[in-house]
Amino acid sequence: MDADERDVEARVLGLLVVRLNYLIQRRIPVRGVQPGPVHGATRLRMADGTTLLVRSDQPGSMARVLHAITTGRAVLVERWERRGPVVALWLGVQGVKMLHLGVVVLGPDQPD
């Protein structure tokens, strides 16, 4: 990877971090879960229009998120962490103790 590619990657990561901090501070909930454009990816749509491509840490996590949304429970981004070249998110389901789901952000996305 050359210097220009590293610079672009750093800028994208910086913008992603700003958006994630905003989602956490404003407590903006997940409003939708849809299949992503590539195998193993999921579109996580937030109430403010933010869309992220993610993959779950454990099988079935996205099904739990979808179930929570359809039963009227809020799913919020609780925190994020940098894990080497990727960003990991912790999603929490309100009203359910001990249901914290981990996902890895593949990158920003835009609605179809």
Image (cartoon, rainbow, N blue to C red):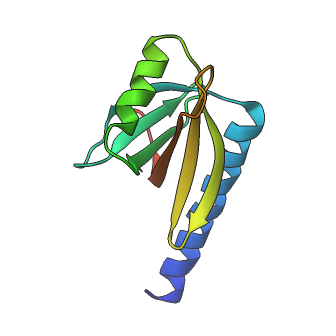
Q: Where residue 108 sits in the image (x, y, percent)?
A: 48, 49
Q: Point out the residue furthest to the left here.
A: 39
Q: Quadrant of residue 66?
A: top left
The reply to whether residue 33 is visible in this rendering is no
Residue placed most toward the observer, 26 or 50: 26
Residue at the image point whose x is 44% and y is 40% from the top:
110
Q: Is residue 76 left or right of residue 37?
A: right
Q: Residue at x 27, y 44 (%)?
A: 37
Q: Is residue 65 above or below residue 38?
A: above
- Where in the figure is residue 27, as x and y percent of width and height? 71, 30
Q: How many marks?
A: 0
Residue at image location 27% in from the left, 49% down from the top? 40
**Quarter occupied by the C terminus:** top left
The quarter of the picture where the N terminus appears is: bottom left
- The residue under the point 42% across, 47% down is 54
Residue sitting farthest toward the top: 71
Is 48 above or below relative to 19? above
Furthest residue to the bottom?
A: 2
In this view, the residue in front, 77 or 35, is: 77
The residue furthest front is: 98
- In percent of width and height, residue 58 lies at 37, 47
Q: Quadrant of residue 28?
A: top right
For residue 15, above or below residue 72: below
Relative height, residue 30 to residue 81 (above, below): above
Q: Is residue 54 visible?
A: yes
Q: Position of residue 86 (x, y in %)?
A: 50, 65
